[in-house]
Image (cartoon, grey):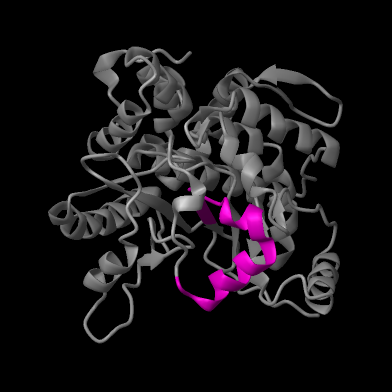
Amino acid sequence: MRIEFAPSRRSTVGAEWELALVERRTGELASVAEQILTEVAEPGAEEHPKIKQELLLNTVEIITGVCDTVGEVADDLAESLDLVRKVTDPLGVEVFCAGTHPFATWYQQKVTNKERYAKLIERTQWWGRQMLIYGVHVHVGIEHREKALPILDGLLNYAPHLQALSASSPWWGGEETGYASNRALMFQQLPTAGLPFQFDKWSEFESYVDDMFVTGVIDDLTEIRWDIRPSPRLGTVEQRVCDGVPTLEEVTAIAALTQCLVEDLSTRLDNGEEIPTMPPWHVQENKWRAARYGMDAIVILNAAGDEQLVTESIVDLLNRLEPTARRLGCQNELAGIETILTYGASYQRQRAVAREHNGSLKAVVASLIAEMREGIAKDEGVSSR
């Protein structure tokens, strides 16, 4: 099988933000996505070009166009979010985002009535029905197909950093899981989800995809749902590691970090460098550590097995990427990573709210709703522990 890669303008960027719909009064999930999508659809069109349906009726996804800067990503997402709110506000429905809803139960949620979703549920059954999860995806443009797989492999070195920064799913069905990101381990139960294989050549990736088609594992290339994957139709590498995060500042910080990492790796390839990689067992262990411990994870840095606290490694990474951020014009957005380091990732802030409200998960949902509207409550001095 030959897979064409449509080259993109280098380091252009786009984002996808999955949003949960909840009843304002109770904090319970609200299955009103179809009504929202109908009302925001443009005249004469079946759907809005940037507000999309998802697997469950309690979810809408907003996506950006192709942007030159992360600042444009922020503006694009904010515009779509405002449009969604014009429909949800009169309905008494709020919007929030986290890797999981703290207390909702998966078996009460309604699946969108579309053939592709019905097929997914039919095949995956119990695990598929449990996909009550939300994420943030970031696309970054690549100008040449031969860069796609080396950049993918290079990004795997930083997957635990992205996972820790975005971790926001400590509860599942009202129970404390002990994980910073329960979503990360839930999602990888689906066929073709989880960590990507590491291929040396594009032809090896093509052979893998051909095998998936021949054996009936997939019917479309997009059904390969890896944490990081090439997107040949768009000419991008897509970073899908992250839990859903509740604030636009965090989304754009994650987008800026991803854009900077891809541009840095691309530049190194231009300079003839070989991108360092780690063996799959190190990559797998890093994913588990970041999902379990979040910002307290000790991550493996390289094939030699050197280790470092993830927050310290993130600080080193920000310092190294500063010139790249200046060149891309995303210094301000990248500074949002420092905000996360200072005030805690979402799972830490959620746990702090629960402690302050005698374990109330409704208070946690209320805090997530407030953060979506107002940003991280920096004046409250939320502990990052």
Q: Residue at x 28, y 59 (%)?
A: 80
Where residue 315 sits in the image (x, y, percent)?
Answer: 55, 22
Is residue 319 visible from the viewing direction of this image? yes
Q: Residue at x 33, y 13 (%)?
A: 356
Residue 283: say if magenta. Answer: no
Is residue 330 visible from the viewing direction of this image? no
Where residue 252 sits in the image (x, y, percent)?
Answer: 40, 43
What stretch of residues is rendered in magenta? 113-139
Q: Nearer the viewer, residue 129 or 197?
A: 129
**Left or right: residue 365 compared with residue 262:** left
Q: Nearer the viewer, residue 22 or 225?
A: 22
Residue furthest out toward the bottom: 44
Q: Is residue 110 above or below residue 97?
A: below
**Left or right: residue 170 compared with residue 334:** right
Where residue 286 sits in the image (x, y, percent)?
Answer: 72, 31
Q: Residue at x 83, y 78 (%)?
A: 214
**Left or right: residue 161 compared with residue 18:** right
**Left or right: residue 335 compared with residue 36:** right
Q: Residue at x 37, y 49 (%)?
A: 20
Residue 136: say if magenta. Answer: yes
